[in-house]
């Protein structure tokens, strides 16, 4: 069980959820949100946005065997192209692969679509046992370079 994160539509981001105390998430929502929207360290072959040199990464990666988060941040200044959509699917699938590797889920599928200008829609489905444990859409908003 995780501490729950909830989307705040007024602010446009996820934050800690409170009931009378910190709310908990008995499902996979928080795990998926953290996996998708925490910045994974860029690979040496990745082209960094804006020609920068910051490869980012989650601070706890220094202590673990597996990188956390996703490389979706690399798309932050990309144009809305088919190649970018495919990269988003690959990055999201990579970020969620641990669910299957650790036996939390039997399968994870991700599809990405350009929902509207500046918004990439990620559809995530997580299969557990004989049913769907999570089926949710997430919007990834970025600033186009062109």
Image: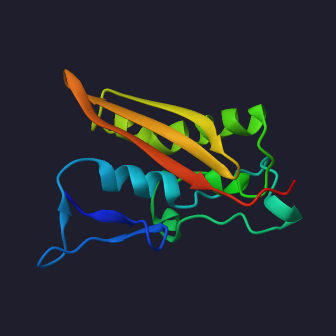
Q: Which residue is drawn at the image coordinates 66% and 66% (left, top)? A: 56
Is residue 138 placed above or below 130 in the rendered structure? Answer: below
Q: Is residue 121 visible?
A: yes
Left or right: 87 in relation to 63: right
Which residue sits furthest left? 20
Scheme of colours in the image: rainbow
| Residue 99 position in % (x across, y down) | 36, 39
Q: Which residue is drawn at the image coordinates 79% and 51% (left, top)? A: 78
* Quadrant position of the N terminus in the picture: bottom left
Q: Which residue is drawn at the image coordinates 79% and 46% (left, top)? A: 45
Q: In front here: 89 or 9?
A: 9
| Residue 14 position in % (x across, y down) | 41, 66
Quarter assignment of residue 55: bottom right
Q: Which residue is drawn at the image coordinates 52% and 41% (left, top)? A: 122
Q: In front here: 16 or 97?
A: 16
| Residue 54 position in % (x across, y down) | 75, 69
| Residue 6 position in % (x across, y down) | 33, 64
Is residue 131 placed above or below 59 in the rendered structure? Answer: above
Left or right: 128 in relation to 98: left
Quarter assignment of residue 129: top left
Which residue sits furthest top? 130
Q: In front here: 104 or 50?
A: 50
Q: Is residue 68 visible?
A: no
Left or right: 58 in relation to 34: right
């Amino acid at each position: 069980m995780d501490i729950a994160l909830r989307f705040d539509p007024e602010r446009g981001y996820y934050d800690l959820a409170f009931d009378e105390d910190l709310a908990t998430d008995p499902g996979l929502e928080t795990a998926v949100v953290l996996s998708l929207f925490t910045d994974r360290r860029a690979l040496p072959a990745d082209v960094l946005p804006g020609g920068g040199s910051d490869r980012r990464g989650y601070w706890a990666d220094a202590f673990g065997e597996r990188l956390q988060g996703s490389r979706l941040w690399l798309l932050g200044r990309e144009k809305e192209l088919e190649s970018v959509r495919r990269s988003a699917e690959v990055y999201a699938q990579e970020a969620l692969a641990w669910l299957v590797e650790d036996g939390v889920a039997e399968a994870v599928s991700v599809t990405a679509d350009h929902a509207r200008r500046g918004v990439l829609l990620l559809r995530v489905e997580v299969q557990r046992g004989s049913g769907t444990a999570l089926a949710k859409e997430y919007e990834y908003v970025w600033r186009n370079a062109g």
